[in-house]
Image (cartoon, grey):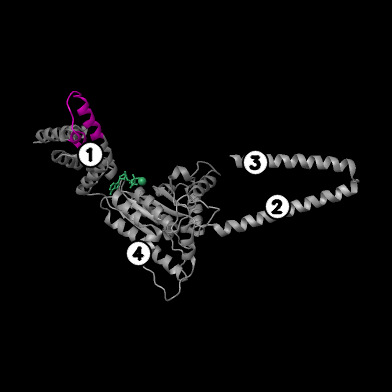
Amino acid sequence: MYGLKLKYLKSSLLIVASLIAIILAFSYLPHALLALLGGLVVILGVSYAFGRNTWKQTKDVGSGPSRAAGARPQRGERKSGGRKSRAEARASRRAEILHPEETVTLSEEREAAGIEDVFTSLDNQLVGLVPVKKKVEEIASLLLVDRVRHRFGLDAPRPNLHMCFTGDPGTGKTTVALQMADLLFRLGYLEKGHLVHAMRDDLVGEFIGHTAPKTKRTLERAMGGVLFIDEAYYLYRAGDSKDYGQECIDILLQVMENDRDKLVVILAGYKDRMDVFFESNPGMSSRIAHHLDFAPYKLDELVAIGRAMLDRSAYYLSADAEMAFREYLTLRMGQSRFANARSVRNELERTRLRHAFRLAAEPEVSRSKDDLMRLEADDILASPLFALAESVSAVEESARRLSR
Ligand SMILES: Nc1ncnc2c1ncn2[C@@H]1O[C@H](COP(=O)(O)OP(=O)(O)OP(=O)(O)O)[C@@H](O)[C@H]1O
Ligand SMILES: [Mg+2]
């Protein structure tokens, strides 16, 4: 604050002094000499400014963090003008090419990149999904080995990292994509590691000249991170010559090829529709390096997911409530618009509402900590789904009786 004021005071004094000097010189000195002096001052000023700028640039380059060295990156890290921090010193040590006789362990490299946190977070957030987690591990291993090769000076061209996530709604695609962005960021393959979620409307325009700027704007937002295109097959409408989707796909293909070191594209959607999309767009298919398939959850997995969700918010199901919840899920899985783990989450939110309403209906009753945590069968059986299922089976029963 004071530094700022002092700077303004100094500048003002300098301007006033210069003005006085100019007026005095104009009154007392011959005009030819004055012009000479003016020229000299301008030359001195320009060379001072130029020299200062060059010095500043050199300084910036010298103190910048070394991502190429594979140092552990920090989100939002700032350059400090002062002494080199320990992390920076470690980074520059890592930037040095290792001697062929030296050895490195991959666990040290994992530790340096800080990717263990990503796997812990994947495990904590997502129940099951073993094949997907294995695939993420495989991708991470490839990149980790590449990093170590790089440290030995071995040529490690950046692998293609564009991916396709297929699966039904609520199977964890977006959650894994977020973790993947973080993983690629920590391993130094993405500059920022953020995720931009986009659908057809964010990329394709409705009239001529609308699509290219729209697609480019979304791509710009995603640069340095992951562009996650949900229901990617809607970009392309087979047989519709007036559709602008193809224009968007062409731009995407170009950027996926030319800017593959700055951006990772993940296409997501139902498997069968994605297959049709790739058949119609072989260029897109050939640019996708990794396919991750998210299988729909089985009943036991859905129950386990529900238990984990409740556990995170300090609730639990009584034994009867768990049986009722299994019944609920069995009915719900057979219905349209079933969205796997999302349906579990939504129903548990409704169950909490009913639990709270049940407790609030008897305000004078004393409640223990356990009462506040335990969800009962009635909280689940009050779902309209059970009444609906009963009326459907009653209708089916009477139809059977009539047909006899
Ligand atoms: N295996 C899992 N364990 C625990 N929670 C899960 C699991 N899979 C998904 N979820 C939860 O379900 C919700 C929906 O997940 P997510 O948005 O990742 O699914 P999605 O496949 O992207 O769905 P959509 O295709 O509808 O966009 C999130 O709250 C997520 O945390
Ligand atoms: Mg999603």
Label 2: few (<14), some (14–19) or many (≥20) C-alpha neighbours in 10 Å: few
Indicate whether 125 appears above or below 261: above
Residue at the image position 20 percent from the left and 28 percent from the top: 359
Q: CA distance from mark 2 to mark 4?
A: 49 Å
Q: Where does the image place residue 99, in percent across and percent down from the top left?
A: 45, 74
Quadrant of the frame with the N terminus: top right
Label 2: element kind: helix
Residue of label 1: 315
Q: Where does the image place residue 35, in percent across and percent down from the top left?
A: 86, 48
Q: Where does the image place residue 390, in percent across and percent down from the top left?
A: 15, 33
Residue of label 3: 6
Q: Are marks 1 and 2 in contact (CB under 8 Å)?
A: no
Q: CA distance from mark 4 to mark 1?
A: 37 Å
Give the amino acid at mark 2: Ala
> Disc 4 or 1, which lies upstream in sequence?
4
Q: Are marks 3 and 2 in contact (CB under 8 Å)?
A: no
> Disc 3 or 4, which lies upstream in sequence?
3
> Disc 3 or 1, which lies upstream in sequence?
3
Is 3 placed left or right of 229 in the picture? right
